[in-house]
């Protein structure tokens, strides 16, 4: 259920994974656009069965989602991934 650890293990074994960034509020939007672009996936770092996963098709939807997550849990960590 720990997605970050899973991605690290996969990467260490040279298996392909999407570009992934761990983020915390406030998110550097310029870095996100430069490194991942849009659309992108926002994930809760822990969980299973698709819970806590959102597709952000554009910058506006991403900023809205980040603001919502921050209002519910100001200390939340997020995994941001390129959309494949």
Image (cartoon, rainbow, N blue to C red):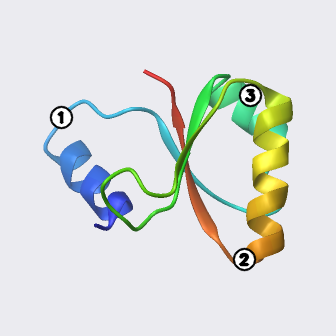
Observer-side mark, 1 or 2, equals 2
From the top left corner, tell me how far across and down residue 59 is, in percent: 81, 30
Q: Which mark is residue 15?
A: 1
Question: Residue 74 appears at what percent x and percent y?
Answer: 77, 76
Which residue is under mark 2? 73
As displayed, is residue 83 above or below residue 14?
above
Quick one: label 1, few (<14), some, or many (20+) residues within 10 Å?
few
Question: Which residue shows up at 75% across the image and 37% down it?
Answer: 31
- Disc 3 versus disc 1: distance between alpha carbons? 24 Å
Q: Is residue 74 visible?
A: yes
Give the SS element for disc 3: helix
Say which mark, if any, is on residue 33: 3
State the image coordinates of residue 48 (x, y, percent, origin top left).
Answer: 31, 60
- Proximity of marks 1 and 2: CB atoms separated by less than 8 Å: no
At 43% from the left and 57% from the top, the residue drawn is: 51
Number of residues whose C-alpha sits closer than 10 Å to that of mark 3, classed few (under 14), some (14–19) or many (20 or more): some
Secondary element at image label 2: loop
- CA separation, marks 1 and 2? 32 Å
Q: Quadrant of the C terminus?
A: top left
Residue 28 in view (yes/no): no
The answer to whether 56 appears left or right of 41 in the picture is right
Q: Quadrant of the N terminus?
A: bottom left
In primary-sequence order, the first of circles 3 and 1 is 1
The numbered mark, 2 or 3, whose residue comes first in the sequence reads 3
The disc, 1 or 2, on the residue closer to the chain's N-terminal end is: 1
Whole-percent x, y for residue 20 in the image: 48, 42
Compared with 81, 71 (above or below) is below
Indicate the secondary structure of the residue bearing disc 1: loop
């Amino acid at each position: 259920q720990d997605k970050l650890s899973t991605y690290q293990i996969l990467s260490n074994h040279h298996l392909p994974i999407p570009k992934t960034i761990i983020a915390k509020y406030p998110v550097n939007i310029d870095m996100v656009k430069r490194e991942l672009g849009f659309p992108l996936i926002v994930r809760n770092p822990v969980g299973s069965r698709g819970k806590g996963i959102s597709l952000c098709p554009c910058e506006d939807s991403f900023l809205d989602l980040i603001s919502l997550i921050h209002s519910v849990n100001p200390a939340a960590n997020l995994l941001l991934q390129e959309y494949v």
